[in-house]
Amino acid sequence: MFSAHDIHVSIHGRAILTGVDFAAAPGQVTAIVGPNGSGKTTLLKAMTGEIAYRGRVSLDGRDVAAMPGWQLAARRAVLPQSAQVAFPFTVLEVLRLGLAAGLSADRRDLPSAALARVGLSGFEGRPVQALSGGEQQRVQLARVLLQVWEPVADGAPRWLVLDEPVSSLDIGHQLEVMQIARDYADAGGGVVAVMHDLNLTAMFADRVAMLHDGRVLARGTARDVLRDDVLSRAYGCTLRVDRTPPDPATAFVLPQAAQHA
Amino acid sequence: MTAMADILRPRRAPVLPGDRTVRARAVTAGLVVLLAALSAASLAVGATGTSLWDALATLARGGEIGLRERIVLFDIRLPRLAMGLLVGAALAVSGAVLQGLFRNPLADPGLVGIGPGAGLGAISAIVLGGMLPARLQALAGNHLVAVAAFLGGWATTLMLYRVSTRNGRTSVAVMLLAGIAMAALAGALSGVLIYMADDAQLRDLTFWGLGSLAGATWTKTAAALPLIALSLAAAPFLARALNALALGEPTAAHLGIPVQLMKRLAILTVAAAAGAAVAVSGGIGFVGIVVPHLLRLAIGPDHRYLLPASALLGAAMLIAADMVARSVVAPAELPIGIVTAILGGPFFLFILLRNRGVLAM
């Protein structure tokens, strides 16, 4: 289990999270959703030790605050919302940073496999700064995958922690990336993802936590959480689940309807 | 020499696209050869008028050379070469480490106020050193100026980092502006001290301030050696951390890097190397920014190769510049800082123009 208990975070004297409990189980995709400013990313940053918090975060029963960085790095990898690479590294060089931090550092074949997984085969020699935003995000995902390549190692699950993994991707790549997360969980690993897209959340998440004003407003399966009353309250507008547009002339495209070749 | 052996050994695995390891090793080996050749040339070329190639050749065969050649070689040229090697390596490595730490290729110890800060330390030691208790003076001895320069550089680097970094993000604009402010402050305080100095101290300050290897002695070289050697020895331990830091501090931490520890070590390394270099040679600009930049274009930004290659190319560049400095207006000498700027500036601009696309960030 990757869990957070009674988490409080204040930034510049303003309370961002107040007493949040959250738990994710291995073998599942657990999504954190909520409106802008609800504290989704803050919760993720507290759980990964990026910001100071009050409360307790534990990974498979151990307090993460007491675990050394290299040990955490072998157990969980974190995909940031956006990652600017400071120097003209090639894609391969960036991927090797992830590979070296994990347990498969000697597998020279893995970077190519990871690139194929994120749909960027043959990109090894490209300077990473010359790639488009979406391509860079997928390179970062490949780097993160390389850090925890086997979803289960030494009998313990490993974790993918993803902060808005599909934010700068088109709908096709969104489905591809979410499928990677799904497969990772199905293979026994754990996935925690901050999500903006409720449709993708409904499609891929086993468990969902809805944050609102720094508290958990609802939690459960996607069905439990994506309800008219919860959504309307959280997002401050009247939202209705499973409704087609009242005006049949309005086009709509849902990822749920996509058919993969 | 392991680098050389690695290149010559036939490789089993074919080179992957995007893998610049082999090229980095080849360039490093080439730099070793270049540095050796330049070092020999630097011993032989100079203002005395006598060609020392013959003397060098005689020495190499185990023969005897005259007193005059002996003095020129062992008491003038050799300490100057040793100091050039140390200072060049120190300037280039401190530049590369600082750029890695700030995640920006424009960070240079001279540019962001660390040079002036170290200068203030050195000037304080020269002017105020006499006020220290005699015991302490005896203890510090020749190292006083170097240590004071290190402390000045360290304090400046620390302040610079504190000022320009908030919530784990370093603002380049704030860094450059803070660097300007700190350079101005250090310059002003240095001015006050110079105003206070007596005639003998003024003479010391003038020699020091020229930014030159001309005053090189074994004593000075020995004073700078420990700090520079320590920082060069620390650099390899920073390489993996600096690579990870290129992805940002949070990501480096998630990759298992002890970020705070590594940042402190990097700041100490920069302060020690830049401080010691400034203490013995005054302010020599451009090496810290040109050398890592050129090498990033040649072998990529992987600090495991960039840092040793920077040490080699920095040393080579400074020795070459020193040869120019003492040849063009012989028997007089140009301050070496002028040579590095005249050679480095346009070359740097040219490289920048050719690679604007790659460097844009």
Image (cartoon, coloured by chain):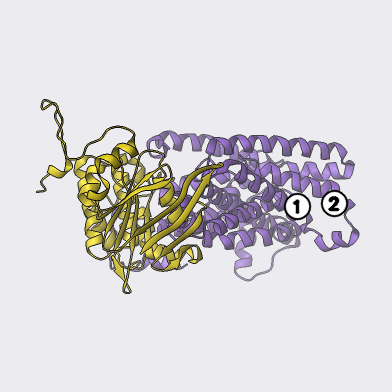
Chain colours: A yellow, B purple
Position of B136 with respect to B116 (left or right) is right
Q: Residues within 10 Å of mark 2 (few under 14, many from 20)?
A: some
Front one among A226 and B116: A226
- Mark 1: secondary structure: helix
Q: Amino acid at mark 2?
A: Gly
Q: Residues within 10 Å of mark 1 (few under 14, many from 20)?
A: many
Q: Quadrant of residue B224?
A: bottom right
Quadrant containing the C terminus of chain B in the rendered view: top left
Q: Which residue is mark 2?
A: B129
Front one among A240 and B38: A240
Residue B221 in sight: yes
Residue A100 in sight: no
Chain at numbered mark 2? B
Compared to A23, does B12 lie above or below?
A: below
Query: At 26% across and 63% down in the image, what residue appears?
Result: A27
How far across and down, in percent of the image, does residue A51 sit?
A: 50, 51
Chain at numbered mark 1? B
Query: At 27% across and 62% down in the image, what residue appears?
Result: A110
Have a look at marks 1 and 2 and say if they share a chain.
yes
Query: At 90% across and 58% down in the image, what residue appears?
Result: B133
Compared to A155, does B159 lie above or below?
A: above
- Mark 2: secondary structure: helix
Position of B233 with respect to B74 (left or right) is left
Q: Which residue is mark 1?
A: B148
Query: At 22% across and 47% down in the image, what residue appears?
Result: A202
Question: Mark 2 and mark 1 in contact (Cβ < 8 Å)?
Answer: yes
